[in-house]
């Protein structure tokens, strides 16, 4: 693979002055990435504290948090254009200021529309800054531009920081207040802004490509589609699904925007997301796998905290300490993927089967383990396996999209679809389905358990009604969770067998084009747009 690229000299970053040692320059940008990834408009780990001190509901906070994911996903389609329009110094400065503003707003507002809008734009600028840093050090990570290797680095940073950010947020709120997390991140972003001004030079490319020919209307419509979908999944149970006008209006608005987008994509030269990206085989395959896999993993959002808090009696700090188990799984999962998939080029089918096998172990462990007397350390194995399985499936199928054969102009659009299906739908659709399933199964089991205890002897045993009701609900929760874990385990085993029996000999060979080639292609596209406009 190295033969595909001309030999290069020692890696250097011209944006950083030469009085900084060359070996330290990439680590400066990794520090920037870590600060950006830890920052955000909202910190979901502090949701319970925010509910207790503001007029917000749990659903409001989740909606704002997922709006941030939507902002990050919708940015993928234009991130290369932004890369060649602004220097790293300008891009990072703008993003730092935007994220500082978002942290200040989210720490002080109780308005749901303001919170959701702020988090959406915080996600946009967070993605822009992350890409600016990662693209700068890409050749340092993989000189041959092998994206399987690069995505291993990306996911150990992104998924790892998600777990560590939760730990930092909860302990910050525990020792002080949840607002202090916003103050801490504002300080770190201000420190990063100062470092950017001092240590990053305004180096411009051979040509700054203007932001012409971008379908901003399409970007807005796709954002509305994603927000409507997320609103339905997050607020569905609260508003009683289709019996409420709110959910119905959200569905109508989402379908109207989707229809307009598809209509516009049929005649625009450069729609925000084209049919070529939507119909690509690898994109469709990744979407289907994400829907199945992350629905199986949705018990993370619906069950695990309820079980650990209501049944095992864990407090907030013990709950967030479970993130360390998931973080360990992520680290090992990335290491396994790096040595097998990225270096030794194991097949996509093999890696997918490994991820689903880990998911089977995760579900089976909880199905047989779930009880009243589980120790905290006993949760290490299932949570470890969940972290490893999720990061393996994410790296593998993001790499498959790079290797999908799409034209480079269409490739970022496929990344937007991948972000929506993998991050947004993976975080909202599965929990909505499993949550509604739990509500129905729990109502059935609670009724059965209530009927079974109505014949006890009142003369010899007296249990207060509220205690009796609590016992019934607790037992119904355990029984219902075990039942749903059983059904999900059956689905996971069926999916694993299907993958094993399917045919697939494709191995990763996802090589990123040179930045010079990308710049030249974008320049041609903008030149054609200008000629057409004239």
Image (cartoon, rainbow, N blue to C red):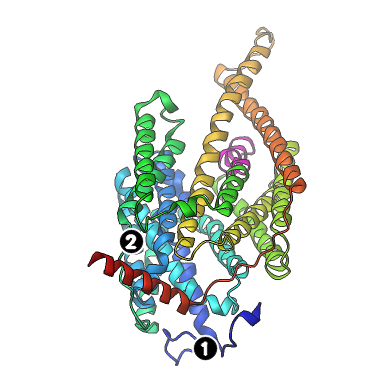
Location of residue 348 in the rendering, given as x and y in whole percent from the top left corner: 69, 57
- For label 1, the SS is helix
Q: Magenta: predominant secondary structure element?
A: helix
Q: Please check the rendered image and state whether residue 312 is part of the magenta-colored stretch, yes or no.
A: yes
The residue drawn where x is 74% and y is 56% is 350
Is residue 372 in view?
A: no
- Image quarter of the N terminus: bottom right
Location of residue 198 in the rendering, given as x and y in whole percent from the top left corner: 36, 83
> Which of the 4 quarters of the picture holds residue 510?
bottom right
Return the residue at label 2: 214
**Mark 2 residue crowding within 10 angstroms, few (<14) / some (14–19) / many (20+):** some
The residue drawn where x is 52% and y is 84% is 24
Instruction: Tell me: residue 216, above or below residue 191.
Output: above
Q: Please check the rendered image and state whether residue 269 is part of the magenta-colored stretch, yes or no.
A: no
- Image quarter of the C terminus: bottom left
Number of marks in picture: 2
Q: Residue furthest bottom?
A: 19
Instruction: Tell me: residue 437, above or below residue 39.
Output: above
> Which of the 4 quarters of the picture holds residue 332?
bottom right
Q: Which mark is residue 22?
A: 1
| Distance in Å between CA atoms under marks 1 and 2 | 37 Å
């Amino acid at each position: 693979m190295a033969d595909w690229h001309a030999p290069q000299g020692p890696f250097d970053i011209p944006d950083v002055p030469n009085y900084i040692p060359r070996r330290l320059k990439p680590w400066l940008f990794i520090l920037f990435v870590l600060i950006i990834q830890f920052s955000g408009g909202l910190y979901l780990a502090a949701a319970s504290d925010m509910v207790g001190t503001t007029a917000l509901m749990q659903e409001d906070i989740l909606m704002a948090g997922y709006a941030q994911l939507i902002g990050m996903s919708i940015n993928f389609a234009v991130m290369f254009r932004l890369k060649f329009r602004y220097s790293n110094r300008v891009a990072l400065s703008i993003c730092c200021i935007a994220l500082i503003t978002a942290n200040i707003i989210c720490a002080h507002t109780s308005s749901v529309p303001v919170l959701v809008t702020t988090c959406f734009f915080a996600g946009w600028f967070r993605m822009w800054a992350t890409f600016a840093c990662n693209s700068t050090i890409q050749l340092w990570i993989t000189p041959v531009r092998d994206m399987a290797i690069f995505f291993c680095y990306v996911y150990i940073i992104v998924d790892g920081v998600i777990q560590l950010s939760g730990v930092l947020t909860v302990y910050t709120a525990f020792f002080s207040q949840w607002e202090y997390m916003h103050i801490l991140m504002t300080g770190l972003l201000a420190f990063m802004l100062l470092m950017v001004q001092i240590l990053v030079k305004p180096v411009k490319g051979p040509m700054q490509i203007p932001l012409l020919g971008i379908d901003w209307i399409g970007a807005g419509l796709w954002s509305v589609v994603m927000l409507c979908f997320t609103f339905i999944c997050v607020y569905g149970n609260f508003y009683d699904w289709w019996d409420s006008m709110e959910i119905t209006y959200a569905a109508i608005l989402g379908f109207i925007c989707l229809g307009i987008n598809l209509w516009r994509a049929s005649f625009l030269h450069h729609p925000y997301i084209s049919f070529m990206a939507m119909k690509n085989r690898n994109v469709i395959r990744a979407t289907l796998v994400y829907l199945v896999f992350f629905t199986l993993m949705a018990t993370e959002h619906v069950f695990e905290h309820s079980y650990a808090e209501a049944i095992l009696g864990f407090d907030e700090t013990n709950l967030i300490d479970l993130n360390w188990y998931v973080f360990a799984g992520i680290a090992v999962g990335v290491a396994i993927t790096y040595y097998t998939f990225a270096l030794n080029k194991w097949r996509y089918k093999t890696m997918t089967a490994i991820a689903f096998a880990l998911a089977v172990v995760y579900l089976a462990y909880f199905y047989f383990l779930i009880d009243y007397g589980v120790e905290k350390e006993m949760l290490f194995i299932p949570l470890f396996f969940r972290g490893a399985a999720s990061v393996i499936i994410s790296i593998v199928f993001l790499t498959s999209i790079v290797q999908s054969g799409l034209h480079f102009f269409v490739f970022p659009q496929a990344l937007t679809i991948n972000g929506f299906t993998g991050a947004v739908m993976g975080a909202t659709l599965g929990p909505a389905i499993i949550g509604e399933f739990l509500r129905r199964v729990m109502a059935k089991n609670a009724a059965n358990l209530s009927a079974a205890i109505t014949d006890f002897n009142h003369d010899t045993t007296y249990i207060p009604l509220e205690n009796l009701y609590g016992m019934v609900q607790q037992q119904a929760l355990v029984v219902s969770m075990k039942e749903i874990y059983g059904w999900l385990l059956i689905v996971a085993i069926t999916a694993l067998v299907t993958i094993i029996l399917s045919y697939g000999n494709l191995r990763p060979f996802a090589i990123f084009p040179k930045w010079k080639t990308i710049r030249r292609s974008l320049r041609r596209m903008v030149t054609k747009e200008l000629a057409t406009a004239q």
